[in-house]
Image (spheres, rainbow, N blue to C red):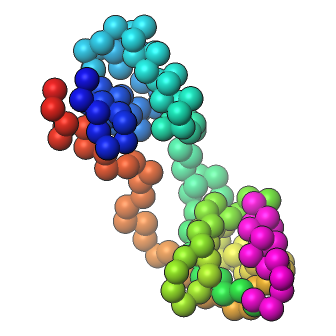
Amino acid sequence: MENTEHGLDRVDMEILDFLQRDGRMPNTRLAEAVSLSPTAVLARVQRLTRENYITGYEARLNPRKLQAGLLVFVQVLLDRSGLNVFDEFKAAVQVRPEIMECHMVAGGFDYLLKTRHRDMEAYREFAGRVLWELPGVRETRTFAVMEEVKESMKLNIQPARLPR
């Protein structure tokens, strides 16, 4: 069993690769794909989950069919005069369902938000009712997405590079 720099062997990496492409892949098919018994594969998947290599499974929904077709990225610059402004901001974004992702970034602003809305009118309402009311917000810049060219959660783990 040859381990990678992450402590995983080639089979672990193949399992992760298959599951990130199809999280609903039956254990028997996964076992066949990596040439192990279903029991051995199940034990590995359980270990990978326990060790947080696998953090969960979810269905990918079509936002256009569910009245959330407008994707908007927002740069947020905080007013740093408050003592706990970063902690307060982070706590506040956790409870907003329109905010899908929030990342603290290096550069000319503090956070990058990924948000989804029905349309531009719904975004304007969100900006006035929610965004500008978040703790410490001093300035924002909005980037409405005109076309989603690529969207993926798949990591480039390339199990084929490992020796068999």
Left-right relation of 25 to 161: right
Q: How many marks?
A: 0
The magenta stretch spans which residues?
Answer: 80-94
Q: Name the quarter where the N terminus is drawn.
A: top left
Q: Is residue 21 visible?
A: no
Q: Where does the image place residue 96, in percent across and percent down from the top left?
A: 77, 62
150 up-or-down from 18: above or below: below
Q: Main secondary structure of the magenta part?
A: helix
Q: Where does the image place residue 147, in percent across and percent down from the top left?
A: 43, 71
Left-right relation of 127 to 48: right
- The image quadrant of residue 105 is bottom right
Foreground residue, 13 or 92? 13
Q: Is residue 15 magenta?
A: no
Left-right relation of 88 to 99: right
- The image quadrant of residue 104 is bottom right
Q: Residue at x 79, y 84 (%)?
A: 136
Q: Residue at x 25, y 37 (%)?
A: 159
Q: Where does the image place residue 54, in percent across and percent down from the top left?
A: 50, 36
Q: Name the quarter where the C terminus is drawn.
A: top left
Foreground residue, 116 or 52? 52
Q: Where does the image place residue 18, in percent across and percent down from the top left?
A: 35, 32
Q: Is residue 91 visible?
A: yes
- The image quadrant of residue 11 is top left
Q: Residue at x 46, y 15 (%)?
A: 42
81 up-or-down from 106: above or below: below
